[in-house]
Amino acid sequence: MTIPTFLTCLPGTWHLERRISVAGHESSHFQGLAHIRPTDVRGTYSFHEEGSFVNERVRQEAYRDYIYKVKGKTLEILFADPHRMGQPFVSLDFSHSIIANDTHVCDQDIYALVFEIISTGEFHMETIVSGPEKDYRLETIYRRI
């Protein structure tokens, strides 16, 4: 499998399982679906995930949206919420490996993201968030349905 092959295979529906680890707390989980759909702009996809967040005290439905933009061997992830629409989150360069990483700084918080391609039907993402008020890790497995 080549990186461009994987990046052009992104469209579709993916089952996702996320483990959320917060310092000093039991792990929480998020399970649901991610829908990646082509937009009218070549190489650009809408990313929408939705599902259930569960921890020791609560179960809550949640969602989030991004824009995925493929440029050769690079995957740019952009914000899709109204107040940051189109602003960059991370840029993942797969030129030399099936693993890419980048960091996003938001005020005093740092989001360090690692994206690993397993196959055309599976990818993993890990995000470590740190800052004065934040200290958590998201580990997500996406599998094509």
Image (spheres, rainbow, N blue to C red):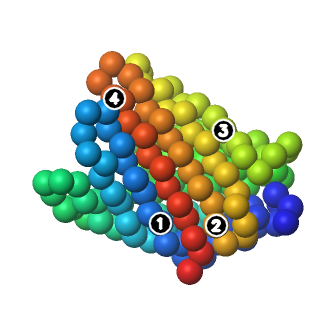
Tell me what residue is drawn at x 36 percent, y 30 percent.
Answer: 135
Residue placed farthest to the bottom in the image?
A: 145
Q: CA separation, marks 2 and 1?
A: 10 Å
Judge whether residue 42 can be spotted in this image.
no
| For marks 4 and 2 on the same chain, the one whose residue lies earlier in the sequence | 2
Q: CA separation, marks 4 and 3?
A: 20 Å
What label does residue 101 carry, if any?
Answer: 3
Q: Give the residue type that dot 1 points to.
A: Leu
Tell me what residue is drawn at x 50 percent, y 41 percent.
Answer: 127
Q: Give the residue type that dot 2 points to.
A: Glu
Judge whether 100 appears above or below 109 on screen. below
Tell me what residue is drawn at x 35 percent, y 60 percent.
Answer: 30
Task: From the image, tell me which residue sits under label 1.
Answer: 16
Task: From the image, tell me which residue sits under label 2.
Answer: 122
Tell whether 138 sits left or right of 43: left
Q: CA separation, marks 3 and 1?
A: 20 Å
